[in-house]
Amino acid sequence: MLFDSPAFFLFLIPVVFFYWRMNHRAQNVFLLLASYFFYGWWDWRFLALMIGSTTMDFLIAQKIVPARQNPHRKQWFIFSLVLNFTILGIFKYFDFFAGSFVGMLDNLGLHHIPLPLIHVILPPGISFYTFQEVAYIVDVYKGRIEDSRTFYDYGLFISFFAHLIAGPIQRPGHLLPQTQNERTFDPDRFFDGLMLIFSGLIRKCIVADNCALLVDAVFGGQLGPPNFWVVLLGTYGFAWQVYGDFSGYSDIARGCAQLLGFHFMVNFRQPFLAHRLQDFWRRWHISLSTWLRDYLYIPMGGSRLGTWKTIKNLFLTMVLAGLWHGANWTFVIFGAIHGIVLPIERFFFPAKARAAANSVPAPPTGFFALWAQRILTFNILCLSLAFFRATSLHAAVQFLAGLSNFAWQPEYASAFFLLCLYSVPLFLIDLHLEATDQEYPFANTSYAFRTAMAASAFAALALFSGSNLNAFVYFQF
Amino acid sequence: MPSFISNSRHPAVTCAKILFAICAALSICFEFLSDYLLKHHSETYARISQQYADALRVRPAKPGEPMSVLMVGNSLLLDGIDVDRLQKLTSSQLDIHPIFLEATGYYDWLYALRRLFQEGSRPQVVVLGVGVNAFLSNSVRREYAPLMFFDLKDTYNIASDLKMDRTGASNLLLEHSSAFWDTRSVLRMQILKHIVPHCGELFLLLKPQPPVPSEPEFGTIANPRLQQLRRMCEAYGAKLIILVPPTPASEDAVHEMTLASRSAGVETLVPLDPAVLPANYYQADAIHLNSEGAAIFTVALATCLPRQLLGHDAVASRD
């Protein structure tokens, strides 16, 4: 069920309606069943995998609580990590690594090595719910949180439909207590939830889906062989597409959660206004970047073990972040570009105090210096996104090789106009949000004004939504 | 127990209810407005409605009457055939009834023809011309076709044929049921044409062209489709002819289509060899024929079609 499809709203409205008429225990059971229905709407066969994985981690967590002093708790902990990453690895990466291995042998002259590829369909949301399960297991093992005593609470924490398919990746310390404690109906947050849903739909259906038309044409070759203008159109267009798409999804997810009395962490904070790549990762897919920081970068040593180890840790974290997005060398290169640029940034723009090693250097005070750094950061990001979007390394290199050709075609003007038509309003909204520090546009205005804005958004959605329902880009991850 | 009702006096809840009501009212308005615009201002809707109604009246020719032909296809025929001229040139031998809807392919016409037959249309010959890649593509047009060509049961069958997921299937169902949902991208296009310069040309360029697979995949896809169409036409007493309009560099595809049709027991008609038609007979999109190309293609079709249907002698004696 896609968040921007009418079917989803036919699902959501009755869920919200009946949910608030139940007591806490019934609410959790009802939401868990609704979430399983939501997940099974794609393919019910994957439900068994998710329920099985959830159940295993629920049971293992009870054996690794520090207070219970189970002598085998470390073994159970390692077993859980291995189990989770094995499931993820088999479904997401087995064919990639096996195929790459066979390709490497082929290059070494060892042809026709029979390695079985499993050709299994990637279960929706597996990367997201696996990361949540791992976070839960680690936090219980380290004693940061109590284990969940009831399966319904834990099952809901993992499977809640609002974050199940594409996040935001929820921290157990934040969401699990919300499933365990009684939720009260808060009219303000309920209304904010509605506004977030409208904001998300505008980002997804108007900005992302329309940019996708241009981007698909660029990468599909309909605008001719790549040249400077085509590359610009493709990478800039994709940057706005993927931002509109994923931030839109996150807004809708957060909005749905608020309609049901939950709170999700903010996942995007005007990422294209970042003045450094380090700053960018503090604004983009925050739930993933903080997960990687807390469960990968810091456990590896973070920036505590000297310059070279910091560089190594940063590089490894970013490469793994790239690989998390998909089983393709293009994603590895995407991550590697960030893994190379981030240490360079740290070298040239060190944080002023060592205590603030993980904090972003303060933005330059001058208007032109700030915007020059923002534009540079955006363009480095766009360069890496060419790899993110391309279907293969060869295609990405071929695409970027067009940058040296400046041949202009008249139809490019219309294409750039169309891109500006959809991206500039979102850019202006981001400037407004950055200046006002609001969650969504006009968040501090009266209810009546926001109602009018939401009604206008509904009309705009009806008239300007992209023609076909496109699956959210991050669903494939 | 927490409830909306207990908080119903809170301004946030009141505004949420008002917003819900506005959205519902706007949806109804959009539906009525789309229906009105479609029926009173859409040239495509008017053309297809008239052609569809005309096609429903088609009956087998009586002795001495010209043979009844239902000719269906997409923009390759819409732009490539001067229908008035074709009818004039062939009027003594053929009674041609066209239905041409842009961006349609095999599945659109499989279900449209089935519905036409079920509703009483009885042509002696069905000529289908959609171009090779549209014939092989796995899609249906999401505007006009669900509303005008498919019935409710068809939407389930199409969703199953195209292996749509439940979201895709429910959207197709909505496109069949709602004039607004069916035509919203057409409405958006009309608005964009007033905002973006040369928008029409740009969108023609942006439209992806499905690739034509090579053998043996070509035959694996084409053969069952051709046989299914042939069996359906034969069940209603009609002969099926696959018309292959010229597109640039489509010689190989045309050749493979001819072979596949032959093995499926379906006749093909290639009035113009794509290799002999220079680029200046095509529009700027390099796909559709321009008016000069259309004039040549129409004459070639007017010559070939009666010959194929009636044979050399019959054509000569009628002439």
Image (tube, rainbow, N blue to C red):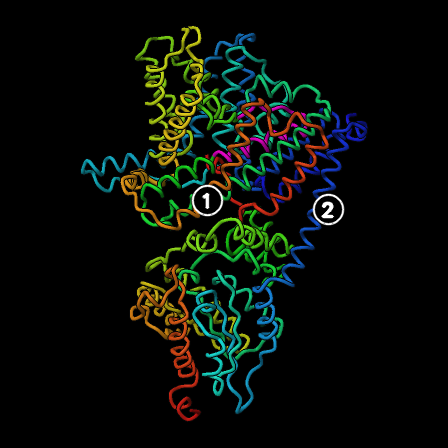
Query: Depth-wise, is mark 1 or mark 2 nearer the camera?
Result: 1
Q: Is residue B279 above or below residue A252?
A: below
Taking the magenta stretch, the answer to whether it contains residue B243 is no
Tag 1 secondary structure? helix
Would residue A45 appear left or right of A156 to someone viewing this image? left
Q: Residue at x 32, y 23 (%)?
A: A340
Q: Is residue A154 above or below residue A93?
A: above
Neighbour class for label 1 at 10 Å: few (<14), some, many (≥20)?
A: some
Tell me the CA gap for discs 1 and 2: 33 Å
Q: Residue at x 66, y 37 (%)?
A: A454
Q: Amino acid at mark 1?
A: Phe
Across and down, in percent, residue A329 comes to: 33, 34
Q: Which dot marks residue B52?
A: none
Which residues fall within the magenta stretch? A243-267
Q: Identify the residue under disc 2.
A: B25
Question: Decide: marks 1, 2 in contact (CB < 8 A)?
Answer: no
Give the farthest residue toward the bottom: B317
Does any portion of residue B40 appear in the rendered image? yes
Across and down, in percent, residue B108 comes to: 52, 62
Q: Identify the residue under disc 1.
A: A417
Locate residue A313: give its quadrant. top left
Give the farthest residue toward the left: A109
Neighbour class for label 2 at 10 Å: few (<14), some, many (≥20)?
A: few
Would residue B90 appear left or right of A319 to someone viewing this image? right
Q: Is residue B58 above or below residue B279?
A: below
Q: Residue at x 41, y 37 (%)?
A: A236
Across and down, in percent, residue A218 comes to: 39, 45
Chain designation of label 2? B
